[in-house]
Amino acid sequence: MFKNVHDKPGKASDMTVFVNGAEIAAWNGETVASVLLRAPGAERRSTVSGEPRLPYCQMGVCFECLVIVDGTASTQGCLVPVAPGMRIESQHGPREISK
């Protein structure tokens, strides 16, 4: 089922990504959503109630992990692997419809 990226031999982390401007260590094979679960203050707000939301299903069904990745809004973080230097921003407001 799930595998822990921390169990891999080698360095403590493979790369650095930026979440809301803060540097966060990340591992090769990790998803944006898993980084969000470790990053302080990375939650988004519900467009209905304003309550804080974090990634939930980890498989692209619930849309609780919508973020802005390298300038692209409404990205499902659970479906995107991290890349060195990636810039991840919390998304506020409703998701956008692609043109």
Image: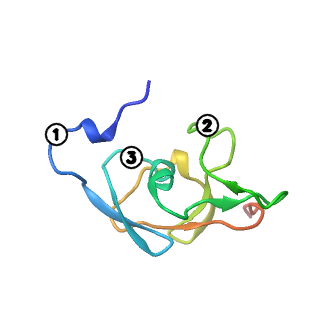
- Place residue 92 in its image quadrant: bottom right
Q: Residue furthest right?
A: 48
Q: Quick check: marks 1 and 3 in contact, CB under 8 Å?
A: no
Q: Which amino acid type is marked by label 2?
A: Cys
81 and 41: which is toward the camera: 41
Q: Earlier in the sequence, mark 1 or mark 3?
A: 1
Residue pictured at 58% horizontal, 36% vertical: 59
Viewed as shown, does residue 71 lie left or right of 45?
A: left
* Residue occupied by mark 2: 57
Viewed as shown, does residue 58 lie left or right of 6?
A: right
Tell me the crowding category of disc 2: few under 14, some 14 to 19, or many 20 or more residues within 10 angstroms, Cα based: few
Q: What separation in Å lies between label 1 and label 3 (alpha carbons)? A: 15 Å
- Place residue 57 in its image quadrant: top right
Figure quadrant of the C terminus: bottom right
74 and 64: which is toward the camera: 64
Q: Residue furthest bottom?
A: 21
Local SS, label 2 = loop
Q: Which amino acid type is marked by label 1?
A: Pro
* Residue occupied by mark 3: 30
Residue pictured at 83% horizontal, 57% vertical: 49
Residue pictured at 24% horizontal, 55% vertical: 14
Figure quadrant of the N terminus: top left
* Residue occupied by mark 1: 9
In the rendered view, would you say 16 is above or below 8? below
Q: Position of residue 81 (x, y in %)?
A: 43, 50
Local SS, label 1 = loop
In the rendered view, would you say 56 is above or below 38? above
Q: Earlier in the sequence, mark 2 or mark 1?
A: 1
Q: How many marks?
A: 3
